[in-house]
Image: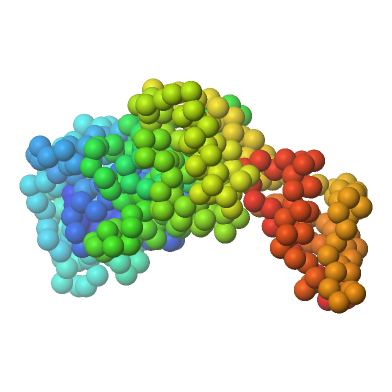
Amino acid sequence: MDRPVVCIVGRPNVGKSTLFNKIVGKRIAITEDTPGVTRDRIYSEAEWLNRHFTIIDTGGLEPDSEDIIPMNIRRQVEMAIDTAHVILFVVDGEEGVTATDREIANMLRKSSKEVILVCNKLDSKETKENLFEFYELGLGNPMAISAEQGMGIGDLLDEVIKHFPENTNTDEDEDLIRIALVGKPNVGKSSLVNRIIGEERVIVTDIPGTTRDAIDTYFTYGENRYVFIDTAGLRRKRSIDEGVERYSVIRTLNAVDRSDLCILVIDGTTGVTEQDTKIAGYAHNNGKGLIIAVNKWDIVEKDQNTYRRIERDIREKLGFASYAPIVFISAKTGRNLDKLFQLIETVSNNNNMRISTGVLNDIINEAVLMNQPPSDKGVKLKIFYGTQIGVKPPKFLIFINKKKLMHFSYQRYLENQIRQYFGFEGVPIAFEFKERGE
């Protein structure tokens, strides 16, 4: 059964994203006193009284605008409304009813969906008197809240869950594989999301920086369920002037933090950049699975050495992530997306792989026989035994006699021996060393 879907709509700057963040319980959508900050549909999981549901934040509707971004936002909102079971129509209680509110109300009445009229910014006795004028919109009893102060949110959610259809699943969802799509601006991350799911889920234009939020897309492929997190591209620091773009950088890093694995999308026409290296480094240092997807392969001028040259350049510049597989794709034509999904499944499985203690110690003992551990001033490194203590990423606890004798080069040697037997393609391996008796 599908998860119930709740969609938040309204004109710009009425507090939709603030309400979204309050319901979700964390800052996912960017909130700023600037109309048009939220452009795409932003999905997240939410829960109220043990009823789990999907909630969508949408960009501010400007029905009469002919500009490209507002027109794209309108299309996104229409698609969100089409998938929703319950719609929260947010209006500004301080400002009162506007012509745009009336147009949106007319649009929602035609949708035949369950609509709850939400009057935001009513946090004082004076402003609460404004509630009555919203009855003219013809959408039933308006509910007074203050998203910023958290007032009235519980009553609102009580009303929301009353409208969930009986044939929906509100149980907790734990089997999702979370994938962050990262890379510098304009490399085709949003186009890749749209190609994968077969609809215009994320706004795609030729304007760099169109995607500002980290946007979740829920998707099923084969037997696995995924959350794709499309992110704003990271720019050079000197290029980040707007406060909103600074938030976007934070969202990108947070997207990596809450992912199981990352797909680093590289522009095949330009190759690896400094920003690519930084993003991959952040994912590596935080123990995330990593796949390198070279996009725009359909327009790269090729000769017989192009593939090897680009692969060699990636390996040289991202040497710390030598475990990461490389796939050459085209979001525009769909080339090699089947290979990308095969890699996603492989990396996800490797991220959760466990090695029994007995097998791990057989590998370690054989490695020690083949290459004796280092020594210092007559004291030799002794490895007593090891065990796996975690996944995502795979983490191994190794008991030794002296920590200072464990050189980085020998740690890398042990990692290579483990990879020789079990591969662990696409995932970093973490080690923790303890002296016996600690």
Residue occupying image coordinates x 33% and y 54%:
235
Q: Position of residue 328 (x, y in %)?
A: 48, 30
In the picture, residue 15 is in which quadrant? bottom left
**Residue toward you, 18 or 294:** 294
Front residue of this view, candidates 82 and 326: 326
Side (left or right) of 112 relative to 304:
left
Q: Is residue 197 above or below residue 102?
A: above
Camera-side residue of 400 and 159: 400
Image quadrant in which you'd find residue 123: bottom left
Q: Residue at x 86, y 54 (%)?
A: 371
Would residue 46 be found to the left or right of residue 144 on screen?
right
Please give left or right for residue 390 compared with residue 355 in the image: left
Question: Residue 218: x, y in percent?
Answer: 47, 38
Q: Is residue 315 left or right of residue 197?
A: right
Relative image position of residue 377 (x, y in whole percent): 86, 77
Residue 72 seen by the camera = yes
User: In terms of image quadrants, where is residue 110?
Assistant: top left
Q: Position of residue 317 (x, y in %)?
A: 51, 49
- Front-lying residue, 88 or 38: 38
Confirm whether residue 176 shows in the render: no
Query: Residue at the location (78% across, 54% down)?
Result: 414
Give above or below for 133 relative to 74: below
> What is the image's colouring?
rainbow
Q: Classify the position of the C terminus by image quarter.
A: bottom right
Q: Residue at x 54, y 47 (%)?
A: 316
Mark count: 0
